[in-house]
Amino acid sequence: MKKIGLGILLGISSFGWAQKADIQIKIKDIKTEKGKLVIGLYDNEKDFPKGKAYQKVEVTPQKSTLIYTFKGVEKGKYAIAVLHDENNNGKMDIGMFGPKEPYGFSNNARGVLSAPSFEKASFIVNGKDKSIVLNLN
């Protein structure tokens, strides 16, 4: 009887782990290895893309393409924002005609004179690993 109970407990606890997934992001069109790429994974509309990210990393860019994986992401709706902070000043530099540094969003979403909405950039994580391709502008 104890063996059956333990097996059920193990099955239930491993079921919880199965609810998490990895999100692999392939960032394309990186023009220079200067600075850093700031990659934010957002789980709500209020914070996207400038507020507190669900997960955020800063990585050294590689010319052309970089692949990064967020591991153990829970089920839900998410959006990704990427900034190539070429001069390492911790912010997006804006000129007279808009952003001076490359950026991008999941679904390659674009906004009009601003970032796209969370809805346009969002995707669903349902417990299965996911791959996203994102082009920098």
Image (spheres, rainbow, N blue to C red):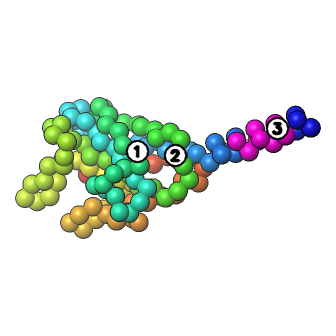
Residue beneath label 1, please?
55
Of helix, strand and loop, which one carries label 1?
strand
Q: Residues within 10 Å of mark 3 (few under 14, many from 20)?
A: few
Camera-side mark, 2 or 3: 3
Residue beneath label 3, please?
7
Kind of residue at disc 1: Gln
Question: Residue at point 29% right, 34% down?
Answer: 61
What whole-number distance in Å separates the C-alpha atoms at marks 1 and 2? 9 Å
Q: Nearer the viewer, residue 123 or 109?
A: 123
Can residue 79 be seen here? The reply is: yes
Kind of residue at disc 2: Val
Marked residue nearer the N-terminal end (1 or 2): 1
Marked residue nearer the N-terminal end (2 or 3): 3
What whole-number distance in Å separates the C-alpha atoms at marks 1 and 3? 34 Å
Query: With 60 as the anchor, is 3 left or right in this view?
Result: right
Question: Residue at point 19% right, 46% down?
Answer: 91
Residue beneath label 2, please?
73
Kind of residue at disc 3: Gly
Marked residue nearer the N-terminal end (1 or 3): 3
User: Residue 132, how many percent across, how many down?
Assistant: 45, 48
Q: Quadrant of residue 122?
A: bottom left
